[in-house]
Amino acid sequence: MIDLLARDAASGYGITALLETEKIPYRPVTSIGDATAPLIVAAYDLAPDEIAALASRRTLVFHGGTRFARDVLGAADASNVERAATLPLGAPDAPVPPAAPRRESATAAESRADAAGTSGGAPWSPRTLALARTLGKTTLRLPPVALCATSSLAEATVLATFADGMPAIAVRGNCLWSAADLGGAFTALVTERATTAHHGPDARAPLRAAARRLAEHAYYAAPEAVRRRVQRRWYAALERRLAALGTAASEYPIDPTGWLLAELVISLARELGGGLARVARWPAPYAAAATLTHDIEPQRFAYTRGLAALLDAVTTSGHPATFGLVARASARWLDTATVARLGRHGVLCHGLAHRGENVFGRDEVRRDVETARRDLERRLARPVRGYRSPRLDRSPDLLSALDEAGFAYDSSYPDVDRENIAHFGSGVRVNVPYRPPLATDGGGMRPSRCLELPLTAPDCIQPLLAGATVETLRADVASKAAFVRATGGLYVALVHGGVFDRDDEQRRTAHLEFVAGELRRPDVWLASADEIADWWCCREALHVTDDGKNVRLVNRGKRTIDAVRVVVERNGAERTVDLPPLAPGASFTITAGEPNDDVRAESAASAAPRRVVPAA
Ligand SMILES: [Zn+2]
């Protein structure tokens, strides 16, 4: 068990989100005196009495403030700055140790670093370093965050330095320290802060939206040659914007920032606790998850022949599909036979008209998304629980509207944005579900009730429209799918139905076959967007505690959850335990030492692939 003292809103939201993503057991505390377990401290302003109280504890401090750096770590010149920072993943040609779970105390980390006389790979796990190498990724690029900047630490062992030589991770006795606020870094990622400085919310948004509505009408009505010319000009302008963003831009097609940030925090929590218990992200036996979504753009062809052909292609492919439908286009063009065929598949709401609707103005946006959902539910005669914003337009007002309107999930935030005009070069850089932070009245942050399933780049055949070849696009999809699988992530693919004509439809169908093929792997859970969201919500409702000997799980949700896999790392060994189905209120305890007979029997019984119990 870890105690968590988080004093700053962005920092607390981020560190909690990271621990929740892995279901690492933790307990929030409001003062250092309340803490009885290894303690994570996220604060920029530790007071002298708090610093004194930390001296005798096992602690992981994020930032901690300049006084902490001076008094505990011996920093001569500590200052509090806010900026982006680059953390190299270790010496480029250092040998990669074999991938094996290990247990290290902070002291062990310190002596290892001392013995090696270098920071080596610490604090990264060998597994992370090996995978990063195969991906060609050599750094963690932190978005603008609070940093405790200092040139040297007289009283601590530096385990890792930033690219500019500044100490990044250090250890002194029982205390691990990160100069950067890594919780705040996660918050900065999902709020796309690295790029918002370049284009913030625009006061002229309503005017601009009206102009775009007109432009979008004209675009969809134009002949192909004109559309192509418009697209080329768009993409040329967008490439110039990307160049202006420089290193603040996300990396296409794979941005490893979210993955590396989570790995760093997990690795530090493991060092702190001398081991770790967590719940696997996906139902056993799957290591990763994927879902295929198909937005149907507001054109007569798309809702008639295009959709019919897409339904045929989905039947042939056999994947669990989720269709994104625009409310007004559905009311106008969907026929009864198509509604019946859609009944077997997942559906999400893809906006009211998809004609330049505005995402600014909380009340207006809420009215639009509620009207869209109501009209679509009426046309389909079934509930609609998910949302995808037209053109992936997004804003804090949209997040609030989706939360208030009671959507179960959204999928409007791409990991790497190379599509949206206002957010080109941005993206959340995260490939797992998360709950977006919403501002509270008291200046705090709370997780949204609407789960985000971040959309995975590349976005459909957009790269072809921007001038890429089919071969390049396929290579990017293949490498992205391999990345998501290797990192236990979620791949949310978007392949549109044919929008304009037969040619367009055939090009997209060929792309669909390729993408589905890349995602169809034995270790990937291929499911509808609703199933993914349901699983994640059921998993969130598991309450996990760890007293250092026993790991106990209680299902605090309203539904039975099946195929839960728990991973316990202790004393250099990693144990995986597959749980029996847990009914609401039921609990399960994994005892220390060797698995007892019951547990062994359950593990064996659940070795065969199983599906999640469907929602009640
Ligand atoms: Zn669309």
Image (tube, rainbow, N blue to C red):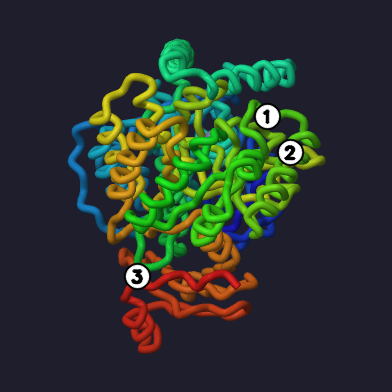
Do callouts 2 and 1 mark residues in contact (Cβ within 8 Å)?
Answer: yes
The residue at 60%/50% (across/down) is: 386
Instruction: Please tell me which residue is depicted at 19% across the width and 33% down the height of the picture.
Output: 93
Q: Position of residue 465 (x, y in %)?
A: 38, 23
Displayed quadrant of residue 504: top left
The nearer-to-camera label among 3 and 2 is 2
> Of 227 and 561, which appears nearest the observer?
227
Mark 3 = which residue?
575
Q: Residue 501: image x %, image y %?
A: 42, 31
Residue 104 pos. (x, y %): 36, 56
Task: Name the kind of residue labelled 2 in the image.
Answer: Asp
Q: What element carries label 3?
A: strand
> Which amino acid, by three-letter code, is at mark 3?
Arg
Q: Residue at x 50, y 23 (%)?
A: 424
In this orientation, which residue lies closer to the viewer: 71 or 244? 244
Q: Callout 2: few (<14), some (14-19), or many (20+) C-alpha neighbours within 10 Å?
A: some
In primary-sequence order, the first of circles 2 and 1 is 1
Helix or strand or loop: what does disc 2 sit on? helix
Q: How crowded is mark 1: few (under 14 residues within 10 Å), some or many (20 or more)?
A: many
- For label 1, being within 8 Å of ligand 1 is answered no
Side of 63 relative to 107 (left or right) = right
Q: Which residue carries the number 2 mark?
A: 368
Q: Residue 357 carries which label?
A: 1
Q: Position of residue 210 (x, y in %)?
A: 70, 19
> Does residue 409 appear to the left or right of 288 in the view shown?
right
Of 42 and 19, nearer the camera is 19
Q: Give the alpha-carbon distance from disc 3 to disc 2, as whole Å.
A: 49 Å
